[in-house]
Structure formats: C-alpha cells, structure tokens
Image (cartoon, rainbow, N blue to C red):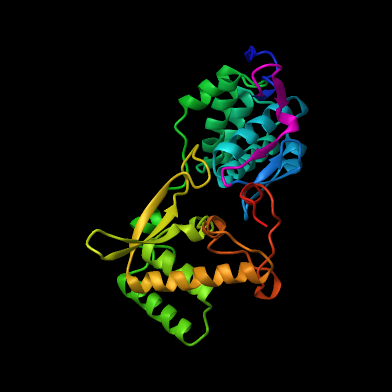
Amino acid sequence: MIDSASPSDSPPQLIAMEGSAGQKVVLLHDIALVSVLGREFNFNDDKWNLSKDISLNLALIMTRTPEQYRESVRRLLAHYATTMSGGSAVRVSVALHHFFSSTSGEINTSQLINFKSDLGDNQESLQCLRPFFRRWLTFGYPGMASDVVAMLDGWRLKGREKGLAIKSLDPTEGPLSDFEYASFNENLIFSYEMGETSLYDFCACMIISTTGRRPIQLTHLKCGDLIDLKGQDGITNYFLHIPRAKQEGGGFRDEFKTYQLTLEMWQLLESHKQKVLRDIVEIGYELSEEQKNCSHYFLQFGIGGNVRKPTLSGHFLAKGFT
C-alpha cells in the first residue's frame, strides 16, 4: 500500500510496484517516463523530447526557478508531459519562465499582483499558470499557498481573442474562400502530374485539404490506418482512420475519427503506403503483416530525401521488429 503524504511533506516518491510478494519500489527518478506521443525521457534529464517536433528545455527553466520550487516544478512538468500534449507542456513552461524572470521569484499574492499589472491586456501567461498552480496545490507539492490559487481563481483574465481571423474572414490569416480552395487543389494536382510535387507531399496535402485535419495528426498515421472493407452487398468501401489530437489526458493514438474515401483517393494513398513499405525493406528490414500495419505512413526523411533508418526500441522491439 502506498502511504499518502501530507501537504507539508515531500510528495510521494513511489510511482509503481511490481509483484505481489516482496514488492519492488520504483522511483520516479529511476524510470523512463513516456509522453502522450510515446517518446521516452528521463525525469532528471536537462531536455525532454516529447514528440518528433517538440522538446522541453528543463535546464533553461530550472535556471530561472528558485531552488525551493525546482523539485515541485519538475514533477508538475512531468505530469503535463505525460498526460497532455507537448505544446501544453511548453506553453506552461514559457509562462513559468516569464513569471520567475519578471518577479522576485517568490510565489505569493504580492508578486502575482505585480506580474498581472506588468502583463497589461494580454494575460495569456496567467491563463496558463492558473491550472498549473491549481494542480500544484491539489497534488500537495511544497511551495504553493492556497491564497495564491484563490486569488487567481477570482480573477477574470484577458487573452487574445480566439478565432478572430476566422470570424472576420481575414484575407491573409483567415480561411480559404471556395475559389481559393478549388484553385489550391487544382494547382496541387497539376504540380503532381508535372512531377514538381512528390507523392509524399501530394498525399499529405490531399489528406489535409479533404479532411481538414491538423498536420500533427498526419505524423501519427500508421499504414494500418488505411483500410478497405467489402460489405455484405459485395461493394468495397475505403476508409482512413485519423488519430485525434488535443485530447487532454488521452494517450498516443487513443481516439480516432474515420473518413470514407473515394476509390481514386484510396488508390493514391495506397500507392504511397506501398512505397513506404518498399523503402523500409530496401534499408534492410523484413516486415510481418503486423509490423507493416504499425509502420509510420509518413516516414521521416534524412539528408537528400533518403529514409532515415530508425533506432529499434520500445514499440518495435516489443513487436519483434528485426
């Protein structure tokens, strides 16, 4: 059984236990943590790689964080990094760095009032810090006072107006008009037919254009997400399962949205899928059917457009990727 710690004590060090008899204690400092996108990182590292594109510079944050708060801040950031998107972890880290750089470093109501005053009308930093400080108090980590959280909860914070470019149909930052959308697709197809756009880029652009998904969701696609199913009527239907993004607390590829494809679109995406699998075989791997389905649909490319040979660890080792 895990003993709970009182708010004045250090937070519990116990993270996991193994076995029923003679249980083995596993400490947070001794295990590899995993981001929601499946990237492993160590609690004590100066840099946490949370996704293919996002890293968190803990060393920089700790240089601005007063000594008495460092352990609590690192633990809370570990919570963000393992339960939320990498972008959320980075945003709250930037807000923390801003707060500690702009104040004496003490977290109290006086410093909070001064910080709010310096922010002016754009109070996004406080919007990020409010849930962070709430969790700090709730988790019972040292350094957070209830009056600080109460003050934050009592404020109505201002931020930049969201969705303004969409609502106002901004010509440069707003949505494409019907004419612009049609023109984009026509020029994309023409560019591909002329050999000016690669199959890789063409498929990526067509998926975004036809489904409206975020680019980050495309990086989560696996070859097994492209499927064809024959119905009872003998007619084959074509589908693409796209992982959802920005699901707080959700794991890597926990939720999907399914899109039905035309035959022409499926044939295009299937041709890219087969090229990806051929590229993997050409760099020296033999794939089982299960491993083919687990392969990334959009592989990373190295210098010169060559497929970057992956380091086989974690998921692929577990699958027996050889």
Query: In the visual, does 136 lie left or right of 180?
Result: right
Residue 5 sits in quarter: top right
Residue in view at x 43 percent, y 73 percent: 268
Query: In the visual, does 288 lie left or right of 269?
Result: right
Q: Is residue 161 above or below residue 197?
A: above
Query: In the visual, does 192 lie left or right of 136?
Result: left
Image quadrant where one finds the C terminus: bottom right
Image quadrant where one finds the N terminus: top right
Viewer-closest of 21 and 68:
21
Residue 83 image position (x, y, % from top left): 55, 37
Residue 165 image position (x, y, % from top left): 40, 58
Residue in view at x 63 percent, y 40 percent: 34
Residue 34 is inside the magenta segment = yes
The span picked out in magenta is: 18-37
Residue 100 sits in quarter: top right
Residue 14 image position (x, y, % from top left): 68, 22
Residue 173 image position (x, y, % from top left): 44, 63
Residue 118 is inside the magenta segment = no
Residue in view at x 34 percent, y 75 percent: 182
Q: Is residue 315 above or below residue 206?
A: above
Please say whether residue 110 is visible from this viewpoint.
Answer: yes
Viewer-closest of 97 and 229:
229
